[in-house]
Image (spheres, grey):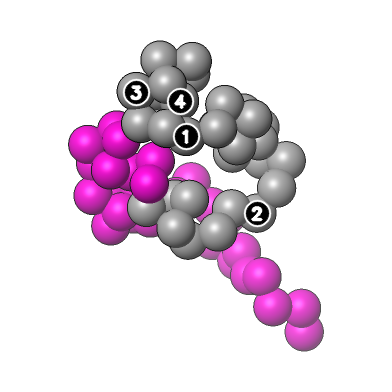
Amino acid sequence: MRQLADEFDIQKSMISRLENAQNEPKLVSLLTVCEALGIKPSKLFLELEKRLPEQFSLIEE
């Protein structure tokens, strides 16, 4: 985490909060981390979609 933060000028605390699901990141933060890790944002979102429960929704009905 420290190397990623130092090498790509990303705050360690932000990386930690993302890893521990302690906050909802801004889109620009996700894009920055994807770029630093060398992965496409679409791959990140596809992986997330696989791991969410089938009936997951952020919208309360």
Quarter holding residue 22: top right
| Residue depicted at x 39% and y 41% | 33
Is residue 49 something one can see in this rendering?
Answer: no
Would you say residue 13 is visible in this rendering? yes
**Label 3 residue SS:** helix
Q: Identify which amino acid the numbered label 2 is placed on.
A: Glu
Q: Residue 38's image quarter?
A: top left
Q: Is residue 39 inside the magenta stretch?
A: yes
The stretch in magenta equals 32-61
Dot 4 amino acid type: Ala
Distance (Cα) linking label 3 and label 2? 23 Å
Q: Name the residue under label 4.
A: 5
Q: Where is residue 6 in the image (x, y as percent from the top left)?
A: 42, 21
- Do tag 1 and tag 4 residues touch (Cβ < 8 Å)? yes
Residue 50: x and y in percent read 41, 50
Q: How far apart are marks 1 and 4 (CA)?
A: 4 Å
Q: Residues within 10 Å of mark 2 (few under 14, many from 20)?
A: few
Under circle 4, the secondary element is helix
Mark 1 to mark 3: distance in Å? Answer: 8 Å
CA gap, disc 3 and disc 4: 6 Å
Name the residue carrying label 1: 10
What is the distance, in whole Å, between disc 2 and disc 1 at their CAs? 16 Å
Residue pointed to by mark 2: 24
Amino acid type at image mark 1: Ile
Q: Which residue is drawn at 55% across and 59% down?
A: 26
Give residue 7's mark: 3
Q: Which residue lies furthest to the top in this view?
A: 3
